[in-house]
Image (cartoon, rainbow, N blue to C red):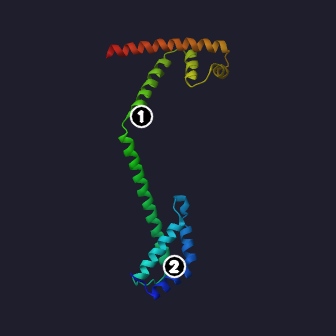
Amino acid sequence: MNPSAFQEEEFRRILDDYSQHMHVQVQRYNLPKYGLDPEDILQDVKIRLWKLICANRRILSPPAYIKKIVSSAVIDQLRKRRRDDNLYHHEKQRRISEQGFPYCWEAVKKKSFEDVVGKAVDRLISSRRQVVKLYLLDLNIPEISSYLNWSRDKTRNLLYRGLADLKEYLKAMEDEHEDRS
């Protein structure tokens, strides 16, 4: 499609006369917020204008038409972005599923281990339970004693006794589990 001199002149006239209007229309959408480049939208608008002029169609109200094609270009870019994001998400999920389930099984094992330890900790007497729970949250003896306002010796004794009781409870729970199997 060879454009005529008249079509080129018409295109340049519209760009010169309505360039500011195009920029205002594009800026009102705050495109960087959506990860879109305003220059891409402006380029798309210019291409649409050019195609319309090359098709020998008259633009009766350039400001209204520019507003319409800016809106259409923004919507098209947002849809394209959403499609691309969905495709990326789908591809990511597919790759994760292809890797197998070792992560999932590890998470399940960890969760069931935490449940078993939690049940065993709940069986401890109150003072030992407090110290052991804080210890399992990665607090050390000085931090636990400071938190509970107890002496370090009391905290240490309760912790060691609580861990010993916890070990016994876990062994008993393991034996019960083996007996059921």
- Left or right of 156, for residue 105: left
- Left or right of 161, for residue 100: left
Residue at 42%, 56% in the rendered image:
84
Q: How many labels does the image show?
A: 2
Q: Mark on residue 103?
A: 1
Image quarter of the N terminus: bottom left
Residue at 50%, 67% in the rendered image:
40
For the residue labelled by badge 1, is the local secondary structure a helix, a strand or a loop?
Answer: helix
Q: Judge by depth and name the residue closer to the eye, 52 or 167.
A: 52
Q: In this view, does 152 lie above or below 80?
A: above
In the rendered image, the residue lying farthest to the front is 2
Label 2, residues with CA under 10 Å away: few <14, some 14-19, many ≥20:
some
- Residue 104, horizontal then vertical, whole percent: 40, 34
Residue at 47%, 18% in the rendered image:
120
Nearer the N terminus, badge 2 or badge 1? 2
Of circles 2 and 1, the one toward us is: 1
Residue at 46%, 74% in the rendered image:
47
Q: In which quarter of the image is residue 127?
A: top right
Residue type at numbered disc 2: Pro
- Left or right of 69, for residue 160: right
Q: Distance between the residues labelled 2 and 1?
A: 57 Å
Q: Is residue 12 above or below residue 27?
A: below
- Residue 157, horizontal then vertical, whole percent: 61, 11
Q: Is residue 59 above or below residue 28?
A: below
Image quarter of the C terminus: top left
Q: In which quarter of the image is residue 97?
A: top left
- Residue 130, horizontal then vertical, whole percent: 57, 19
Q: Mark 2 points at which residue?
A: 63
Label 1, residues with CA under 10 Å away: few <14, some 14-19, many ≥20:
few
Residue type at numbered disc 1: Tyr
Q: In which quarter of the image is residue 57?
A: bottom left
For the residue labelled by badge 2, is the local secondary structure a helix, a strand or a loop?
Answer: helix
